[in-house]
Amino acid sequence: MVEELLKTGQYEEARLRLRAGEGSDQEVASLEALLEVRDALREKRYAQVQKILERDADLLSAYLDLEGARRALEDFDREDPSRIRPYTDDPHLGAEAWTVLGVIRVRSGDKAGAKAAFEEALRRDGGHYRAKTNLGNLALEAGQVDEAIRTYQEVLKQNENYSHAHHNLGAAYRKKGQLDKSVYHIKRAQRLMFLGGAARASGSSRWPLPGNLGQRWWIWLILIVGIWFLLRR
């Protein structure tokens, strides 16, 4: 039973059954690897997904088409809708496929189609915070500021360190005239982007404190100019 749940991407149900004593140690390890893949996809860290596929091939191969997944990551990067559609029904890749399709539709001006794509992504993975952030962006662009704020706040409950949600929440608060809240979230976004860049430069996906901040003067200059511009607006 656990094996079928893992194959069909029903991770939470599989987790509950494993905690109840069903399944094997191998299935526990496979679930952990599948969850790592899901988390990296939510963050659009495709290179990290590739590493997980290589590292845990023996754990994932029974549940995930590894070669197909590698091709999918390349196609997601290309953002060619004709190449992405075949993955929309995949139990492991479908949410990300719909999220990428939504972004493509936004760029082509199809806001209604984009909204439907992001909603489908969330139907498949309710924790896909990038898809939810994009729904907030659509609401903000449509002048639905309160709806956008509510959506960004929900995103930050799922991932409090998601810099784009902080940045866009700051923009939404600015439209409401709540400058204190706006500046707080803009500053938080800038700091998270800075720390994320430091983590990527060091080859780590964690959030280490950067060393030698004096040599990062240009980051702080951008931050100061951004806040100054925000207050003038």
Image: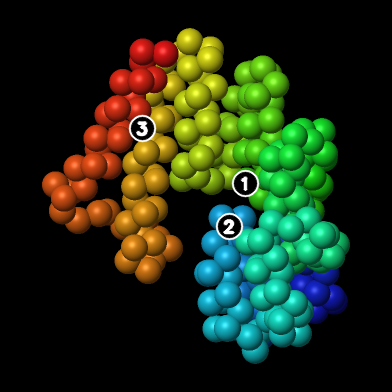
Write down the residue under mark 1. 130
Is residue 115 in view? Answer: no
Write down the residue under mark 3. 187
**Residue type at mark 2?**
Lys
Q: Residue at x 43, y 22 (%)?
A: 182
Write down the residue under mark 2. 44
In this rendering, position of residue 161 left or right of residue 107 = left
The quadrant the N terminus occupies is: bottom right
Residue 40, picture quadrant = bottom right
The quadrant the C terminus occupies is: top left
Residue 193 image offset from top left, x and y in percent: 39, 46
User: Would you call the spot at circle 2 few (<14 residues within 10 Å), some (14-19), or many (20 or more)?
Assistant: some
Say what secondary structure mark 2 lies in: loop
In this rendering, position of residue 13 left or right of residue 230 = right
In this rendering, position of residue 182 left or right of residue 113 = left
Residue 199 image offset from top left, x and y in percent: 36, 60
Residues tagged 1 and 2 counted as in contact (Cβ below 8 A): yes
**Residue type at mark 1?**
Arg
Q: Which mark is residue 65?
A: none
